[in-house]
Amino acid sequence: MKLPLILASTSVYRKKLLERLHYPFTCEKPLVEESSYKLSQFKPIDVARALAREKALEVSKRFPGHLIIGGDQVVALENQILSKPGSIEFGISQLLKLQNQTHELHCAVHLLGPGIDTGFVETVKLKMRPLNFNQAKEYIELDEPLDCAGSYKLESRGIKLFESIEGGDHDAIVGLPLMRLQNELLNLGFELFDKIR
């Protein structure tokens, strides 16, 4: 029997992505303190993996008998984790740090439920084009990516900032690698196309 699905996130980006798979689900905010992980000495990929599992675990304690999807995304430049900017000034400084560089985005997913404890990470490498201060400022003001790690929205005007993207599922950049997640859900007994709309 297929378990009811919960996305352990209140991210509008992850919610919109998961809606594309057309499975019924609800969203729950995971009560997890992320900053201690992101300030740790762990590699960025391990931080993403640990946070995805921790979020799924926290929500699963409140909703036993459900399949929980935990997710986390870490943007890293030379093993330094880049946060959500929160302000225009910090967003500009992050873009100027990333300009003309290749950085990594690690998107981790963890599935947790009765008899289920599995996860994966999709890593995408992004090469940002050279930018000057005025271009970075104009982009931040237009796209307002203040709640996005790395200070860009690839699904919007942010695509113009990049010269190349390598590897992984491009949906991972937005917050949830849908192709790999669909594979995992199929392995857990979900139908490819649900009859219930």
Image (cartoon, rainbow, N blue to C red):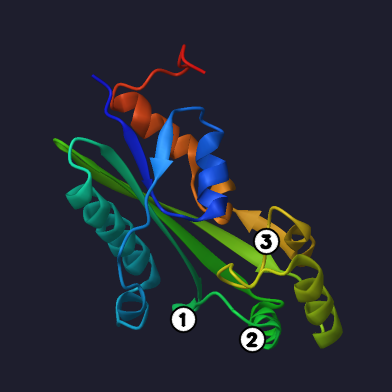
> From the image, which quarter does the N terminus lie in?
top left
Going by the numbered disc 2, the residue's amino acid type is Phe
Residue 131 is at least partly visible in this image: no
Residue under the point 74% across and 58% down: 159
For this view, does 171 lie left or right of residue 186? right
Across and down, in percent, residue 45 comes to: 37, 65
Residue 10 shows up from this direction = yes
What amino acid does circle 1 point to? Gln
Q: Which residue is mark 3?
A: 153
Q: Which residue is mark 2?
A: 90
Q: Which residue is mark 1?
A: 80
* 122 to 2, vertically: above or below: below
Q: Quadrant of residue 126?
A: bottom right
Judging depth in this view, the residue of 175 and 132 nearest the camera is 175
Relative placement, left or right, of 133 versus 75 is: right
> How far across and down, in percent of the image, does residue 51 sit?
32, 63
Q: Please give the name of the residue rendered at 79% of the width and 75% of the height, measured from the top-left corner.
A: 141
